[in-house]
Amino acid sequence: MLRPIECYRLLRYDSGMDTPLASQPPSLLDQLLTPVGDCLTPEVALHLVDLHASADVQARLEILADKSTEGQLSDEERTEYAAAVAAIEFISVLQAKARRLLHQTQA
């Protein structure tokens, strides 16, 4: 069974932070992807929102996250983990734009 990419676990986001993401200005990535979000159709948005990592990918990400937290990543693993985190951020921004579109079309 496929599970959603648990970005908050991989990035070790502290949910007790007193600066909610919604109150922060849009990131550069968010701004770069705005034109892509503007091209989304409801059908494509549904597919984006439903993207999940395979069990193998999720397991690998969890291993890398744990090793990163422990400061035990090799140089190769650090590169792999950095690429994965960047991809997760990219996907997360697109998914947020897709959810926003779906919410607007349901209203």
Image (cartoon, rainbow, N blue to C red):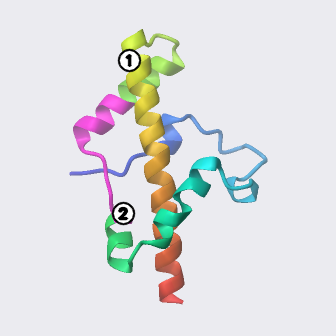
> Does the stretch in magenta take in 51?
yes
Circle 1 residues within 10 Å: few <14, some 14–19, many ≥20: some
**Residue 35 at what x, y percent from top left?**
52, 65
Residue occupying image coordinates x 60% and y 39%: 13
> In front here: 33 or 53?
33
Magenta part of the chain: 48-61
Circle 2 residues within 10 Å: few <14, some 14–19, many ≥20: some
* Mark 1 element type: helix
Q: Earlier in the sequence, mark 2 or mark 1?
A: 2
Q: CA distance from mark 2 to mark 1?
A: 27 Å
Instruction: Identify whether 57 is placed above or below 68.
Output: below
In the rendered image, which residue does mark 1 sit on?
A: 77
Residue occupying image coordinates x 53% and y 20%: 69
The type of residue carrying mark 1 is Glu
Q: Main secondary structure of the magenta part?
A: helix
**Residue 71 at what x, y percent from top left?**
52, 12
Residue occupying image coordinates x 74% and y 55%: 25
> In front here: 32 or 59?
32
**Residue 95 at what x, y percent from top left?**
45, 61
Instruction: Identify whether 29 is placed above or below 104.
Output: above
Q: Residue 77 sits in which quadrant? A: top left
Instruction: Identify whether 52 is placed above or below 66.
Output: below
The type of residue carrying mark 2 is Leu
Image quadrant occupied by the C terminus: bottom right
* Mark 2 element type: helix
In the rendered image, which residue does mark 2 sit on?
A: 48
Numbered label tally: 2
> Does the stretch in magenta take in 45?
no
**Residue 2 at what x, y percent from top left?**
25, 51
